[in-house]
Amino acid sequence: MEPTFRAWYERKMLATPELVAETKLVERLLGEIRTIAIIGISKNEHKDSHYVGRYLKNAGYRIIPVNPGSTSILNETSYPNLKDIPFPVDAVDIFRKPTEILEAVDEAIEIGAILIWLQLGTGTHPKAVRKAQSAGRILIQNRCMKVDHQFLIRTLPYQSHIDQQHKEQLYEHQR
């Protein structure tokens, strides 16, 4: 089944030169970051945000839950907002309603997160992208951090980094 999902991922994430470049950036960033604050992570283990957080924690990242309704999620102290986290955060993964994205992006910029990630389902936010870029931050949207990690980092023994020639062949084939 893994080859089927890999083929899907490559068709979707390597469909254009822009997506190839973004996927290479995502691969680099996922290899560099260590601490990820997850805004909107749920205590409910059946919710996507919880599942993504658990996966990332098991993958070796330090997960910082941000949920004002909880004091602990995934056996980690949960904070009501990003500003209350008493140490630096490399990345902020956002699981919020589309109407709440700009506020979350502003807070992520304020705490100095290098990477701001808008999970699938949060919408497309050109204004958030401009804000992040103006602040010297990287904003990724319409992607899932867990899915990208699975295909770009976790499966490296199966297939080392997707080589440039393969990416170019795949792109040409899809045209």
Image (spheres, rainbow, N blue to C red):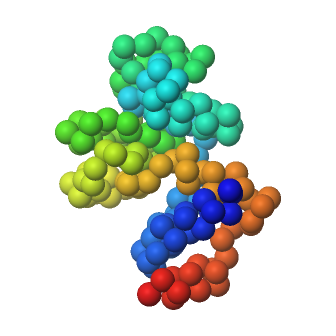
What's the residue at 38%, 54% (across, down)? 142
What's the residue at 37%, 54% (across, down)? 141
Number of residue marks: 0
Residue 122, x across and y down, in percent: 31, 45
In this image, 162 relative to 122: left or right?
right
Residue 152, x across and y down, in percent: 63, 59
Where 174 sits versus 78, above or below?
Answer: below
Residue 7, x across and y down, in percent: 60, 68
Residue 165, x across and y down, in percent: 64, 84
Residue 111 in view in this figure: yes
- Corner quadrant of residue 164: bottom right
Looking at this view, name the residue that lies furthest to the top.
Answer: 71
What's the residue at 32%, 52% (across, down)? 132
Looking at this view, name the residue that lies furthest to the right.
Answer: 157
Residue 106 in view in this figure: no
- Corner quadrant of residue 61: top right
What's the residue at 48%, 67% (across, down)? 12
Where 79 sits versus 115, above or below?
Answer: above
Q: Quarter of the image containing the N terminus?
A: bottom right
Q: Quarter of the image containing the C terminus?
A: bottom left
Question: For this rendering, which residue is in front, 167 or 5?
Answer: 5
Question: For this rendering, which residue is in front, 15 or 70?
Answer: 15
